[in-house]
Every structure is written in structure tokens, then in C-alpha cells.
Amino acid sequence: MAAQAALSLSGSVSCGSLTNAVTRSHGKVSASSSAVPKRGLRSFVGLKAEKCGVSGACVFRGGELFKTLAASIDAARPAKNVEGTPRPGQARASSYKVAILGAAGGIGQPLSLLIKMSPLVSHLNLYDIANVKGIVADLSHCNTPAQVSGFTGPDELAASLKDVDLVVIPAGVPRKPGMTRDDLFNINANIVKTLVEAVAANAPNAMINIISNPVNSTVPIAAEVLKAKGVYDPRKLFGVTTLDVVRANTFVAEKKNLRLIDVDVPVIGGHAGITILPLLSKARPSVEFSQEEIEKLTVRIQNAGTEVVEAKAGAGSATLSMAYAAARFAESCMRALDGDPDVFECTFVASEVTELPFFASRVKLGKKGVEAFINDDLQGLTEYEQKALEALKAELQGSIEKGVNFVHKQAAPA
Ligand SMILES: NC(=O)c1ccc[n+]([C@@H]2O[C@H](COP(=O)([O-])OP(=O)(O)OC[C@H]3O[C@@H](n4cnc5c(N)ncnc54)[C@H](O)[C@@H]3O)[C@@H](O)[C@H]2O)c1
Ligand SMILES: O=C(O)C[C@H](O)C(=O)O
């Protein structure tokens, strides 16, 4: 079984210029402190560094995502191509089939556009209970390589998942002002359960990126569904918490007048309220904050989703920044599948870095999913961070149990 396969991994991890032994016991995979590059951010942000200066600051080229657009523009000039970039329609050595479930929504549509721009994608399947025909017609006119197909309604769900390598799930209702993410549980739990059952039946080896809230419960729901179907591989199931990292990076850069692209802040725990814990002491480049600044920034990052919900005043929650964050995480998954040895992301996964069964922390991604946990992030925390970590555990545990119990109750005979 796939879950068992996770226990028998062996090998080594290469991070930037460093190669390190990976230790494993009882399915736990961890990389030692030396697995984290000491110089700059080059491998922490999913995007690859173009060049890193002596100061350690790196220049990012925005990821492969935008190379295709550049190539598309370049193709308009006769007999010229961006070096090493396949022309639109030209196949890469490896490319991947991606399904987006909930593709017609506020996140689904811009996410579909961003993923359509990735040269790593050969096929993009858009599924929703709402009609996706118009979105497919619209997107398919972009001259980037991915072939776009549409699937509407439960009768077409299985076909949307055939042979896919990566499934991204933004299906579900968003918050309105005054609601918590947990208030979405009653509707979204069933949506995620049904969709993951279809993934288990039709794409059991795919990596799964769950965006639907409450992530702290929907990921455990997905895990239980996959377990019940005998296809659970904990290395391949991810709760997408990238938006928390994106926000933390942005707010820290703004506060300290740093270039946005140079900043990387690990965010651990979960994806709701106090379970979102930015580790400002681990920000790269390292930044000095007063205690007041730390507390204000932490609360702002924790409440950033609510900030958007309130600004949208009933019209939903974050969609564009979420699409950006989800596209980055999907691109990182595909790079890992493609054999890139240098892909690191924070994500909410089955974990043994704390006593909780699921936890968001920085992981190294490889061809088979999570390859190693970067345990260093949790070492040497400040007193404030350590207290916040202890304080979040009860809420996170409760949300995880709620998800697990939901699936068990439904499975129990009446
Ligand atoms: N993880 C995060 O950081 C993060 C960030 C933002 C939003 N979210 C969550 O993402 C979800 C979607 O947000 P949105 O703004 O795109 O909402 P939305 O209402 O704009 O879109 C949701 C889409 O899901 C579709 N859908 C509903 N039930 C479905 C089903 N059974 N199968 C397939 N599709 C179905 C709807 O038709 C709709 O197109 C929400 O739960 C929201 O809370 C998570
Ligand atoms: O806040 C929400 O409800 C959506 C999302 O989880 C976010 O962080 O923006």
C-alpha cells in the first residue's frame, strides 16, 4: 500500500549546494539542520533563484510560470526564442496533467489561468458543478502549451481525473463577514469528501492540493477518505497554506523596506486564527523587530484572511492572492515531480514534527511528495513563538479530530 511505501524511503536530500543524510523512523522523515541552505533563500520559496549575491540576497525570476508568457511574446518576433524555453505548443521532456476541482469559482478561474501559463502542464482539466464551458473556451485561446478540457457536474467528475498527476481542490463556499473558517465545515466537509472519493477511485497516485476551508479539518477528512479506500499516501496530501507565507513575506518586506521577492518567512501550525503561526525569528533575510512589532505583525498575518473578507463585505474571501499562492504551490509540486532537487514549501501535512497528527511546516518536496521535514524551523524559537505554538495545539487538535470524526460517523452503520 502507498502508505507503507512511505515507511521504506531511503536516500539522501540535496538542498542547494548541500547534501545531507535524511533520517527516518516509523515513517518519520526529517532533514538535519545542515539540510537548510545557510546562504539566502535560494531553495525556500518554491521559485528558483537566478543569482545570489554575496549578501545572500537572491534574484528570483518569478518561476517557470512566466517564462511561457515570455516565450509567447517572443514568438511574435520572427526567428527568435528565449534560450532554453520551449515555444508554445512545443512539448517539454516532462509535463503534467492537472485537474482543478471547483474551477469556476473565485479562486478557480484565476488559478486556472495561472496554471495554463505553466510550461510544466500538458493538460488542464477544469471541473465544477457550475458550467465551465465558457471558461474553457476563453482559456483555450491562450497560446500556451496546456490543453484545456471542461467537465461539468458529477457525471463528468471521474473523466476529469483520468491520468492526472496533480489535483487542486478550491471547491466550496467562502466566508462572509462575521464567520470563522470553521463555520464553513458543514457544507465544505461533504464537498471535499465527495471529491476526494472520486480522486481515490480515479487518480489514486496523484498529488492532492486542498484549498477548501477549513483546511485544518478538510485535510484530515481527505486523509480518512483515502485511507478507507486503501490508497492513502501521506506524502502526497497537502493543505495549501502558501497564502500565509505569501502574506507574511509581503507584510515583513513592507514593514522593513525590503524587496518583496527577497523575503521568506516560514509559517507553521495550521490555517485558521491562532493556528497560523509566522516564525518571524526565522525570517530570511534575518530582521530585527521590537516585541510590539512582532505581536502586531503576527496578529495581522493571522487575521489577513478576515481583512479581505471584511473588505469584500459579503462578496467572498481572498481569491486573487489565493490563486497566486495556489499556483506557486502547484508549480512547486510539479517541479518536484520533474526531479528538481531544490523545492521547499510550508504546507499542512501528516506530520510528526509535533505530537499533532497534521501540522503545517516547511517540507522538502520530491517526486513522491514530502521527502523531508525541515525540523530546524521549530528549534530555537523565541519565548513568544514557543508560547504561541503551545497555545495553538488544542484548537488545531480539535479541528483535526472534527474532520476525522466526520468521516468515521458517516461510515458507521446507522
Ligand atoms: N487555503 C486557503 O488559504 C484559502 C484561501 C482562500 C479561500 N479558501 C477557500 O477556498 C474555497 C473556495 O473559495 P472561492 O472564493 O473560490 O469560492 P467560490 O464560491 O467563488 O467558488 C467555489 C466554487 O466551488 C464550486 N463547487 C461547489 N461545490 C462543488 C462541488 N461539489 N464540486 C465541484 N465544485 C463545487 C462552486 O460552483 C464554485 O464555482 C472556500 O472554502 C474558501 O474558504 C482557502
Ligand atoms: O479567510 C478566509 O476565509 C479565506 C482564506 O482562508 C484566507 O486566508 O484568505
Image: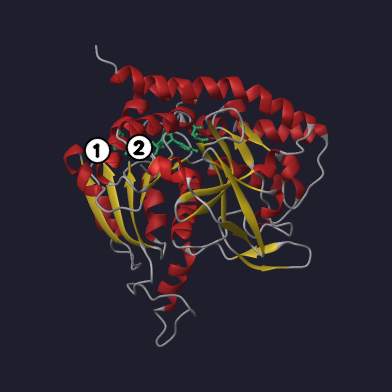
Among the 4 quarters of the image, the one containing residue 60 = bottom right
| Residue corresponding to mark 2 | 171
- Whether residue 68 sits left or right of residue 268 in the image: it is left
Name the spot of residue 345 as percent of width and height, x first. 56, 49
Whether label 1 lies within 8 Å of ligand 1 gets the answer yes
Q: CA distance from mark 1 to mark 2?
A: 9 Å
Quarter of the picture holding the C terminus: top left
Mark 1 and mark 2 in contact? Answer it, CB < 8 Å: yes
Residue at figure coordinates x 25%, y 39% from the top left: 130
Please tell me whether mark 2 sits on a helix, a strand or a loop: loop
Residue at the top extreme of this rendering: 414
Q: Residue at x 25, y 14 (%)?
A: 413
Residue corresponding to mark 1: 129
User: Depth check: 314 or 392 in front?
Assistant: 392
Residue 183 seen from this side = no
Which residue sits furthest left?
A: 155
First reached walking from the N terminus: tag 1 or tag 2? 1
SS label for mark 1: loop
Indicate which disc residue 225 carries: none
Identify whether 337 is placed above or below 54: above
